[in-house]
Amino acid sequence: MTPNASTETSSNPDSFYDRLAVHDSFEAMSRPGVYAKLPDDWFVGAADIVGSTDEIAKGRYKVVNTVGAAVISAQINAVGALRFPYIFGGDGAAFALPQSQRDKAEKALAAVIRWAREEFSLEMRGAIVPVSTIRENGLDVAVARYRASKGVDYAMFAGGGMTWTDRQMKEGKFRLEAAPAGARPDLTGLSCRWTPIRARKGKILSLLVLPEKDADADELARLYHRIVAIEESLERAGHPVPATGPGYRWPPEGLDLEVAATRGKTSFAVQKLKLLAATFIALIFFKTGWKAGAFDPKEYVEATAANADFRKFDDGLKMTIDCDAETQAQLTELLEKSTDAGLIRYGICEQPEAIMTCIVPSVTRNDHVHFVDGAGGGYTRAASLMKTTAAIAR
């Protein structure tokens, strides 16, 4: 999908993202005209976990997702009130920021790379690439904003530049080194407290649809429109999180991950005791429905479901949906025909559950964000199956 919107200009390029229109229709994200090109003096940051497929095979899918989301959490805390586009990819994430934030962004990402290595023995790659360099290589980065709920909107990307950046990073180019030993990112708000969410209609599908090189933009837009139409025919568009919110039990399954994310220089044991107490108090409120000041537990869990990021455009289409067998067959037939035609390549990971990793600046506001992935490998597993799927389809 090639964006055809012109580059935004302003005396203050840092406010570019704030000035973008916010769209209520997800289907609109399939149209090139809704995307605006990033200013030339911005840069793209990206990171992912080396060998993430093997880590997931060992059952560490929640660790992988938490480290991926930490990339975004660290950037949010580094730049403060500045709004900027970012996207979660399962085993990593990407973001874009103005040049004025580059020093902060590099330090935050380098600290995440160090933290992942020392806390979880995970090797993470990171890269920082100027948008101007991406354009010099014949690609672009354009962004649109999709409103998932009244409290949250998410960035969508087009132009091929994010995919190119990811490929360059995996080849070792534009490499960002880890911060010095002992460095820790500010991951305030990063949490993993919800229980896995079981499929209610059939299976949780994590689906990746990526364009082939030189795919016709109009044909691609029509295909995305058809895929989204099928997905939206599902109850609540296949949203994997119940409208009443996900489940919660004590102690939370992801408690140790949250301890590792938030302890800073505090010992693991002390921070775990603090979070055990805090999460037990949260359990009481969720079970009783009691309110505390501005915190309404019913409203919070409903906002959690509404805010969940379960579908996105990122130089292609990515969705984690609760899907019945009939609709899955319909999607697969369409995708295989499109693959045979040389328009796209795709990968699907089937699993019984979805998981969420969250960034919650405050429980009294409704702007908390929740990244959804499949609990059996999700987007990472779907990506690893993509070549096989495409080869079989052809």
Image (tube, rainbow, N blue to C red):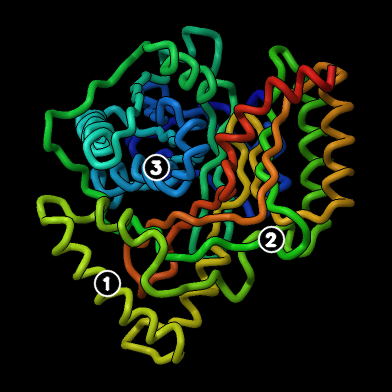
Q: Which amino acid does label 2 sit on?
A: Ala
Q: What residue type is labelled 1?
A: Leu
Q: Mark 2 points at which residue?
A: 199
On the rendered structure, is 231 left or right of 271? Answer: right
Among numbered discs 1 and 2, the one appearing first in the sequence = 2
The answer for how far apart the CA atoms under marks 1 and 3 are is 33 Å
**What secondary structure is marked by label 3?**
loop
356 w.r.t. 340: above or below = below
Q: Which residue is drawn at 14% across and 64% down?
A: 270
On the rendered structure, is 186 left or right of 63? Answer: left
- Residue extending farthest to the top is 137
- Residue extending farthest to the front is 58
| Quarter the N terminus occupies | top right
Identify which residue, 223 or 14, lies in the foreground: 223
| Quarter the C terminus occupies | top right
- Where residue 256 appears, as percent x and y from the top left, is 30, 57
Mark 2: few/some/many CA within 10 Å (<14, 14-19, 20+): many
The answer for how far apart the CA atoms under marks 2 and 3 are is 32 Å
The image's mark for residue 84 is 3
